[in-house]
Image (tube, helix red, strand yellow):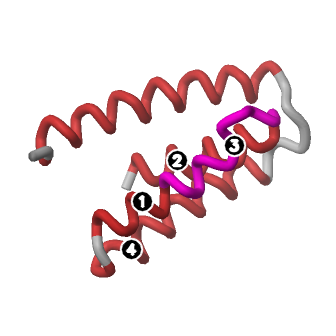
Amino acid sequence: MRLAEVMGSLAFLRGLCEADDAAQWPERMQDLLEAEGPERAERLAGAYNRGYAAFALTYRRCTPAAEIAIARFLEEGNALAGMIATRYGN
């Protein structure tokens, strides 16, 4: 759930800051939803939307604080993805 929330936060913040990979975050979330299956899709989508909405309420433009948040979320997301792959990977 936390990974989905991080992805939602990044989807908003990367778009706000006009990053080259901004359009990839919703696509990555769709890939996660498909990998997890319909039984978890609603909860994962809710976590993603919470992450997105939390920053949509706070930021109206890209700021240094938003850039710091992006860096932290990228680091956290990478760590979470690594742990998930190690624990559940093929």
Q: What amino acid is labelled 3 in the image?
A: Ala
Q: What amino acid is labelled 4 in the image?
A: Ala
* 29 sits left or right of 71 in the view: left
**What's the magenta region?**
17-28
Q: Residues within 10 Å of mark 1 (few under 14, many from 20)?
A: few
Q: What amino acid is labelled 1 in the image?
A: Asp
Report, in whole angstroms, how far the alpha carbon at label 3 lies from the one at label 4: 22 Å
- Foreground mark, 4 or 1, reads 1
- Residue 59 vs 68, above or below: the answer is below
Report, in whole angstroms, how far the alpha carbon at label 2 lies from the one at label 1: 12 Å
Q: Which residue is mark 1?
A: 31
Residue 81 location (% of width, % of height): 32, 38
Quick one: label 3 or label 4, which is nearer the N terminus? 3
Q: Secondary structure at mark 2?
A: helix
* 79 sits left or right of 83 in the view: right
Q: Secondary structure at mark 4?
A: helix
Q: Which residue is mark 4?
A: 41
Q: Residues within 10 Å of mark 4 (few under 14, many from 20)?
A: some
Q: Which residue is mark 3?
A: 22
Q: What amino acid is labelled 2 in the image?
A: Met
Q: Secondary structure at mark 1?
A: helix
- The tag on residue 7 is 2
* 56 sits left or right of 86 in the view: right
